[in-house]
Image (cartoon, rainbow, N blue to C red):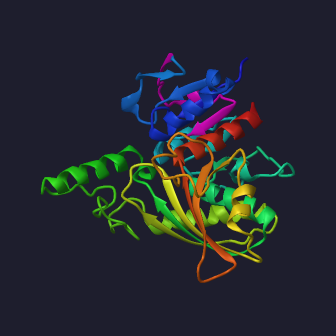
Amino acid sequence: MSETITLIGGDTLLGREVREVFAESALGSQLRLVAADAAETGKLIEIDGAAAFLTKLDPDAVEDATVVVLAGTAASSREAIAANPSGLIIDLTYVTEDDVDARVRAPQVEGPEFEREHSGPQVVAHPAATAIAIVLSRLHAHYPLANSIVHVFEPASERGLAGIEELQQQTVSLLAFKDMPKKVFDAQLSFAMLPRLGEEAETKLHEVEERIERHLATLLDRTDGVPMPSLRLIQAPVFHGYGFSLWIEFEDAPPVAEIEQSLPGDLIDVRTGDLEPPNNVSIAGQGGVAVGSIVPDRNNGNAIWMWMAADNFRLMAESAAMIAREAV
């Protein structure tokens, strides 16, 4: 019997990105698409030019799958897990994070000696944690780090389609002098930077910040002594893609030109001083991370400032695809 990869949430924003990344390899032909919401059952969508239907989330959809990818809602993930699938669970929704057998994964920063154990759920690391780990581990391998501080600017898309729609509606309402919807953020996000969301927001920003820290600490613990950075999460009034401001102190700082030469690779796109720095719009659909605007700290001879951007959904989908390949 051929191996099947069941994707729960096949038409969510994250699910669509998973479909696209999987379709770039043989994994795409193994996908079985399952709706995260009963109302979407039977919806016709496309995978790599071919038509496909979203099937109903029931035990038959997950029991025989070699891999079950959770990319829908927390409720749909719990329902899929309740069906007791025998295959590997790849969790992009974090509902299995507290499972004692779960492992936080980001294959992009796992070395060849990393022990890949597939007996428990594979929790895809938060994309911000993965992006930061990619850059800090690459730098530390060339020039040992002493300290770092990272400001993370979170997009509305991290709250799914509801977050994107609310930001759009807030902008339209504000310009029309109308009351703004605040169901998702419980605060005015349009034209504003928020260090925390409103009290009635379903997701608390400090909880997301703590998850990023946990996942980043886990990933860095698998590297060769990369020190844990100080981190602050800020909700940004952008639709999609992360922005990062990094302050990095070295034990003995090299020239910026040497840093720019040491960073490029499969996962890091370096925009040198003569190029436009990356941003959350230009990074859309691009794998890995992009860095630029690397400049010395005028008040610390061993430190630099760096700007970084990453497509949040793309990073998670790439992680999921790497883990799926291990299983099939």
Which residue is found at the position 29% from the left and 56% from the top? 183
Q: Quadrant of residue 83?
A: top right
Identify the image quadrant of the C terminus: top right
Q: Position of residue 139 (x, y in %)?
A: 73, 63
Q: Position of residue 286 (x, y in %)?
A: 57, 41
Q: Is residue 238 left or right of residue 218?
A: left
Tell which of 263 and 77 is nearer to you. Answer: 263
232 to 157, vertically: above or below: below
Q: Quadrant of residue 304?
A: bottom right
Identify the image quadrant of the N terminus: top right
204 to 9, vertically: above or below: below
212 to 144, vertically: above or below: above
Q: Is residue 324 visible?
A: yes
- In the rendered image, the residue lying farthest to the right is 113
Can residue 67 be found in the magenta stretch? Answer: yes
Which residue is found at the position 53% from the left and 43% from the top? 77
**Start-end of magenta stretch:** 50-70
Q: Is residue 34 left or right of residue 300?
A: left
Which residue is found at the position 80% from the left and 63% from the top? 142
- In the rendered image, the residue lying farthest to the bottom is 299
Q: Is residue 205 left or right of residue 97?
A: left
- In the rendered image, the residue lying farthest to the front is 274
Which residue is found at the position 48% from the left and 69% from the top? 206
Q: How many marks?
A: 0
Can residue 141 be found in the magenta stretch? Answer: no
Q: Is residue 100 visible?
A: no
Tell which of 277 and 136 is nearer to you. Answer: 277
Q: Position of residue 238 (x, y in %)?
A: 38, 54
